[in-house]
Amino acid sequence: MYMFNWKRFGMVAGLSLTLVAAGCGSSEDEGTESNGDSNGDEAASEMNYGEEMGYEITGIEAGAGVVSSAEAAVEEYENLSGWEVSTSSSGAMATALGEAVENEEPIVVTGWTPHWKFAKYDLKYLEDPKEVFGGEEQIKTMVRQGLKDEKPNAYKILDQFNWEASDMEEVMLEVSDGASPEEAAQNWISNNQDKVDAWTEGTEEVDGTEVELVLVNWDSEIASTNVVAEVMKEQGFEVTITPLDNGPMWESVAAGEADGMVAAWLPGTHGDQYEQNKDKLEDLGANLEGAKIGLVVPEYMDVDSIEDLEAAE
C-alpha cells in the first residue's frame, strides 16, 4: 500500500501534461472563466482513489462489528464492486492511517467514535445513504449473573460508571502519546474526582476482593476498562484485566468466568454476541452515549459519501 505506485505516477504525470496544455491554449480559452472551472472539475473527477489504494478498506480485527458492516457495505454499494476489507488490528489500522496522513495519501479505514484518532488527525466519516452502519450506538456495561449478591460494591461501581466521549478520548490520546493505560487512567481520575465520587457513591471500601474485567483490545475499551479498574483498586479491590476477542469476551461474562465488562457496543457492533448471550448475563445499561461506527477518511480526500468511491476497474 505504501510502495511507489507507477500507475499513480503515470496518471499524475498525464494530468500534469493536460494542465500544461490547457495553460498554453489560445487567448480565447484563457479569457473564458467557465472553461477554467470545467477543467478543474474534470481533473478532480479523474482522481481514482480506489486505484491508488488497491481498492482496499483498512479494517481492524476480523469479526468486529464495524468490519462486518464494512463487508456488508461492499456487498450493498454497487460502486464498491471489487473492493475488499483487509482485517488486521486496531493498532495496525491506526499505524496505517498515521502513515497515510503523514504522506497525504488516500486511505479508507473502519472507524469508530470515541477514538483518539479524531483528536489527532483531521478526519471525517463518509456518508452512508444505505445506512449499512446504522445510527448512533451506546457502549454498555454487562456483568455476570449473581455479581450483585456476591460482590455488591463492585456491582454498584460498575452500575454507576458513566462518562462522555471527550473523557474517553482524553485517556486514549494520552495512551497513544506514550503513557501506559494505568498511568493515563490515574491522571484522568486525579483530574475528574467529582465524576469518580459519583461512581463510588454508596459503596464501601473492601480488602482485596478479586474482580476480573474483560475487554476487546480496542483503544477505546483499553481506556474505559483501565479507568474503572483503577477506581476499583482505590476502593480496595484486586482487579485483573483480561483482553479477549469479541466472542470470548461476551462468553466469559455469560458463563460467569469473568465478573463484567464496560465494552459492549450496541445495538450494531456487538449485536450478534448480545443476542447469543443476553439471557445469561445482566445488562446494566449505557456507560457512554453517542458512539458511532463507519468508514473514515482524511479531510483532504475529495469524497464525502461512500457512493463517491469508484468501483474496481
Image (cartoon, rainbow, N blue to C red):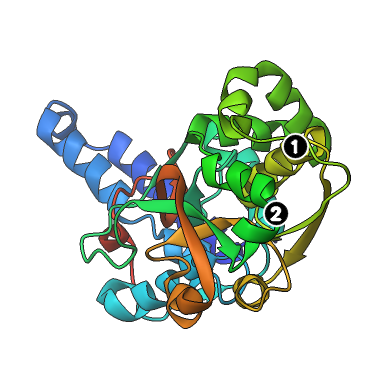
Mark 1: amino acid: Val
Q: Nearer the viewer, residue 41 or 109?
A: 109
Dot 2, how many residues are within 10 Å of its Cα: few (below 14), some (14-19), or many (20+)? some
Q: How far apart are labels 1 and 2 at the CA level?
A: 30 Å
Using the image, determine if residue 156 lies above or below residue 250: above
The numbered mark at residue 265 is: none
Q: Nearer the viewer, residue 201 or 57?
A: 201
The numbered mark at residue 175 is: 1
Dot 1, how many residues are within 10 Å of its Cα: few (below 14), some (14-19), or many (20+)? many
> Residue 116 falls in which quadrant of the image?
top right
Percent of width and height locating residue 158: 60, 47
Residue at 70% of width from left, 25% of height from top? 189
Q: Which residue is mark 2?
A: 151
Q: Judge depth for marks 1 and 2 and give the one in front.
A: 2
Q: Nearer the viewer, residue 204 or 270?
A: 204
Residue at 41% of width from left, 71% of height from top? 69
Q: Considering only order in the chain, which callout, 2 or 1, is on the residue closer to the N terminus?
A: 2
Percent of width and height locating residue 12: 48, 52
Mark 2: amino acid: Lys
SS type, badge 2: loop
Percent of width and height locating residue 14: 44, 55
Residue at 35% of width from left, 72% of height from top? 73
> Residue 275 falls in which quadrant of the image?
bottom left
Using the image, determine if residue 133 lies above or below residue 176: below
